[in-house]
Amino acid sequence: MISETPSSIDVVDVVGELDVGAADDLERTLAERIDEGRSLVIDLSDCTFVDVAILRALRSSYVRAREADALFFVVLPFSASPEVRLAMLHLASGLVPYPVVPDRASAVVQLSRASRTRLADMLNSERLLDLRARVWENGHRRERLLSERDVLILTQRDALRRRPRRVVDSAG
């Protein structure tokens, strides 16, 4: 699904499991938008699985966008499925030259004020790639700890509700 946003930016929502069968359709959709001169934000928030064919389609679309002087961002939230995070941040670290941001707002802000040359220099930085991976790992760790905390709080509340109440005998 493609939704329009201001300033010649298209947001492409990628939903569900994407494998080799969906790669050509995705690449064709992105190519059409790039050829129209649109900047793209690819949102993987609702994506549960991507394989290498999808990563290659994103990479070739990114190269096409650079050649067309269009900007290209991929949204990978901290809450994305572990399979997608693993594919994007670990398996494909050399295959993923495009900028990955944690939410749409970050992508739109970066699109609106990005200097194309500064962005290109920044993306080629090994330090940035390492920093990006650590940020996502820390974000994931934070989300996991918050989830574990919530489970603990609910367990404690349930235990307090089930605890027998002491009755004080006033006659004795």
Image: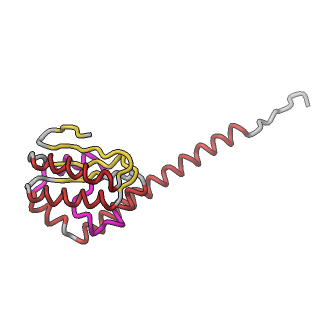
Q: Nearer the viewer, residue 160 or 97?
A: 97
Residue 121 on image: x %, y %: 14, 66
Residue 41 located left or right of residue 85: left
Single out the residue that lies furthest toward the bottom: 126
- Identity of the residue drawn at 23% across and 40% down: 2
Task: Reply above or below: 165 against 141.
Answer: above
Image quadrant in which the N terminus is located: top left
Q: How many marks?
A: 0
Q: Nearer the viewer, residue 100 or 163?
A: 100
Residue 133 located left or right of residue 70: right
Single out the residue that lies furthest toward the top: 171
Question: From this viewpoint, is residue 79 visible?
Answer: no
- Identity of the residue drawn at 90% across and 27% down: 171
Residue 43 on image: x %, y %: 28, 47
- Identity of the residue drawn at 83% across and 33% down: 168
Question: What span is in magenta?
Answer: 89-115
